Amino acid sequence: VERGGFRGRGGRGKMLTYPYSRICILSQLFTGFKGVRENEDTSDGDSKFTRRTSQQSCSTIKLVPLLHHKELLIFFAGPMVTYIPPTLPEDEASIFAHYKTGIHFDKYDDIMVDVSGTNPPQAIMTFDEAGLCESLRKTVSKSGYVKPTPVQKHGIPIISAGRDLMACAQTGSGKTAAFLLPILQQLMAHGVAASSFSELQEPEAIIVAPTRELIHQIYLEARKFAHGTCVRPVVVYGGVNTGFQMREISKGCNVLCGTPGRLLDMIGRGRVGLTKLQYLVLDEADRMLDMGFEPEMRRLVGSPGMPSKENRQTLMFSATFPEDIQRLAADFLGTDYLFLVVGVVGGACSDVEQTFVQVNRFSKREQLLDLLKTTGTERTLVFVETKRQADFIATYLCQEKVPTTSIHGDREQRERERALADFRSGTCSVLVATSVAARGLDIPDVQHVVNFDLPTNIDEYVHRIGRTGRCGNIGRAVSFYDLDTDGQLARSLVTILCKAQQEVPSWLEEAALSFPGSTGLNFSRKTFASSDSRKWGSMHDKSVIIQPGAQPAVDEEDWE
Ligand SMILES: Nc1ncnc2c1ncn2[C@@H]1O[C@H](COP(=O)(O)OP(=O)(O)OP(=O)(O)O)[C@@H](O)[C@H]1O
């Protein structure tokens, strides 16, 4: 049923063992039985069923036959989730804490921008032109924003004009505010009703993102910009006590931020209604629509009460948009949507200096240690392929007296949040992470990203190295390249380096040429390439940045 999860086929009264605490959907398998629908913290399972939880990672469910039941069986085979995140500080200093824009912030103005689609509205040049209400102007200024970034200059008027949008802009260039500000402004302008207590809440905006930490970060941004207004943002994501989140929703909810699973759960429980929905935002939209999440996104837009795409505004943001995903995305957007490209679709942030080191798999660990000795206390994010590897490397570095923590999908939510907090505060200068930390996370002063293992997908690489060099600051990325295993990525890496105007090591170029299937390289050094799939028709240039057949992030279980 799930990779490495459900083992037994089950049967009348048979004991089944689930080694992971995951939801298993056992369609049709047990016709004639009804399973316990046990939700993490509500023991609302039918009393005719027994559920025995042994250790945290191993639950046992006994199925008891119930004649004449032929439902889809849904089991939650995990321990009760009791985690309630710490209360957030309410003081302005904490809410508006931000880091400084870097010396390259003004260079954003030189990046080429292309808006395709009919009648795009005029871009704004300043926040004054954005027509923000007084409260929002104040929160923008308290956040340290002086002038808008290109994605904000173009995105804000497009959204304010009521248009659907697919926006592609480099990592760390302010996409979050580009959708939050116009949504909040429109809600305020149309006199959004201050939320009040009700078991069913009907938010005006829903924002979806692929990981718990990212959606929490977006929620913090929404809470920051909405500070002092009557708009109430709420966040829901897995790994946190459901009852707690239901109570938070019932206190009032205008902007609901969520990971897909928990969001659908809240809708399914009748806690969230969709009839008032005006805005649906997919952050990291290419990830939200790839094969991992697409079914959930379709379930979301097909949920009862969800306004049709003509009757809601759908907004998609990412730094990468492979062509096949662009085509798929069109199913969710109104026909007249605008496609905004800042720089190169799928391009790496040019403020990140990218270096490649040839390694063999047996020397990597020592090379990492040597590298970290040269970086000292610089905040460094180390990406590895698997959860086990993350634990292993973090333990190794701790033994070598490098203050290290780790984040991956098998850690408890409490531990994940603790790890991130320790990294943010500098208690641990090194964070070893799987792909769960690749997208969206905005951590101040990450000077350095190390790809201990290169990902198999070039878009994943772009997002990973984008954890540094944000908002005009300069960052460095070092990638360990193993000739035995990373050959299939060589060609895409060369293209990424060329487009970011960076030096390509000759051995990498050779590796790209010698990889089976390479038919000569033609790496343009263009600073800009518009890549709206509607323009290409069937004649488009299949740039290697776009990899239609690319596999999703390796460590699928890391995602929500
Ligand atoms: N106009 C601005 N002026 C100053 N700082 C800004 C501005 N816009 C955004 N920022 C800050 O820049 C940082 C990066 O923004 P954000 O996280 O929205 O980037 P992003 O484009 O969504 O990145 P990613 O692709 O990695 O998700 C944040 O700390 C944000 O507060």
Image (tube, helix red, strand yellow):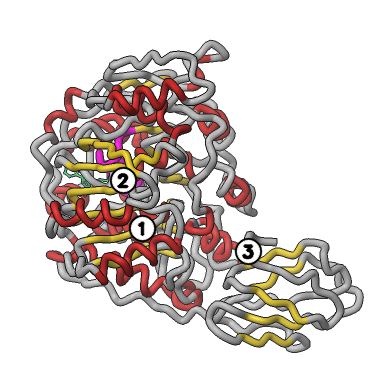
Circle on res. 292 = none
Identify the amino acid type marked 2: Thr
Q: In this rendering, does residue 270 appear at all?
A: yes
Q: Which residue is mark 3?
A: 4
Give residue 474's position: percent from left, percent from top.
15, 40
Q: Which residue is mark 1?
A: 433
Q: In which quadrant is the N terminus drawn?
A: bottom right
Marked residue nearer the N-terminal end (2 or 3) = 3
Considering only vertical position in the picture, is 185 above or below 231? above
> Magenta part of the protein: which range?
169-186
Q: Main secondary structure of the magenta part?
A: helix
Queried whether the magenta region covers residue 461, the answer comes back as no
Give residue 549's position: percent from left, percent from top.
57, 32
Which secondary structure lies at badge 2? helix
Q: Residue 373 sits in which quadrant?
A: bottom left
Between 549 and 99, the residue placed more toward the observer is 549
Q: Gap in Å between the C-alphas at discs 2 and 1?
A: 23 Å
Q: Which residue is mark 2?
A: 176
